[in-house]
């Protein structure tokens, strides 16, 4: 239960809020909680504010893909990897629970930065985050 929900319920228990008012506030919190969150990748030329590459993937799509992947997990040999820009990433590492946990850790309106990288050779700045 979120801190906001606890506070609203405590205020009802203390008589500071009427149940109808609490219901309205809890409904507003649900609307905020249900808003779309995205896995975002941005690539900037250094010194520029506008990204030259933008990738936005809804977290719901990642969750679905992860669940589909889990259904076929037995078909992929254990220890399989994928090479992404020269880095080997184990397919065993990605689970629906991991994506759910990441999404839950993001505070209301928050941003979870996964990585920020400066590529001096290409004079680029890359940001990967969930928002």
Image (tube, grey):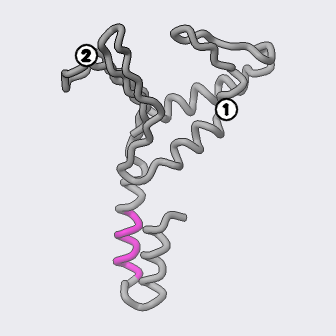
What residue span does the magenta drawing correspond to?
Answer: 19-27
The secondary structure type at the circle numbered 2 is strand
| Residue closest to the far front | 120
Magenta stretch prevailing secondary structure:
helix
Determine which residue is flagged by label 1. Answer: 95
Residue 68 located within the stretch drawn in magenta: no
Label 2 and label 1: CA atoms lie apart by 33 Å
Task: Compare residues 14 and 43 and report the one nearer the observer.
Answer: 43
Instruction: Tell me the number on the disc at residue 130.
Output: none
Mark 2 residue crowding within 10 angstroms, few (<14) / some (14–19) / many (20+):
some
* 124 lies left or right of 65: left
Tell me residue 7's x, y (percent): 44, 75
The secondary structure type at the circle numbered 1 is loop
Splitting the image into 4 quarters, where does residue 12 fall? Answer: bottom left
Quadrant including the N terminus: bottom right
Which sits earlier in the primary sequence, circle 2 or circle 1?
A: 2
Splitting the image into 4 quarters, where does residue 77 fall? Answer: top right
Image label count: 2
- At horizontal 58% and vertical 37% (from top left) the residue drawn is 99
| Residue closest to the far bottom | 15
Tell me residue 58's x, y (percent): 43, 31
Q: Comparing marks 2 and 1, which lies closer to the viewer?
A: 2
Determine which residue is flagged by label 2. Answer: 45
């Amino acid at each position: 239960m979120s801190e906001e929900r606890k506070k609203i319920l405590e205020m009802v228990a203390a008589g500071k809020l009427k149940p109808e008012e609490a219901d309205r506030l809890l409904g507003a919190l649900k609307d905020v909680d249900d808003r779309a969150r995205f896995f975002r990748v941005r690539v900037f030329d250094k010194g520029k504010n506008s990204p030259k590459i933008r990738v936005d993937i809804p977290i719901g799509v990642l969750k679905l893909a992860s669940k589909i992947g889990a259904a076929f997990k037995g078909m992929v040999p254990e220890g399989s990897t994928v090479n992404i820009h020269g880095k080997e990433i184990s397919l065993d590492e990605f689970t629906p629970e991991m994506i759910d946990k990441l999404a839950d850790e993001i505070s209301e309106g928050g941003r979870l930065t996964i990585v920020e990288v400066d590529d001096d050779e290409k004079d680029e700045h890359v940001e990967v985050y969930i928002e």
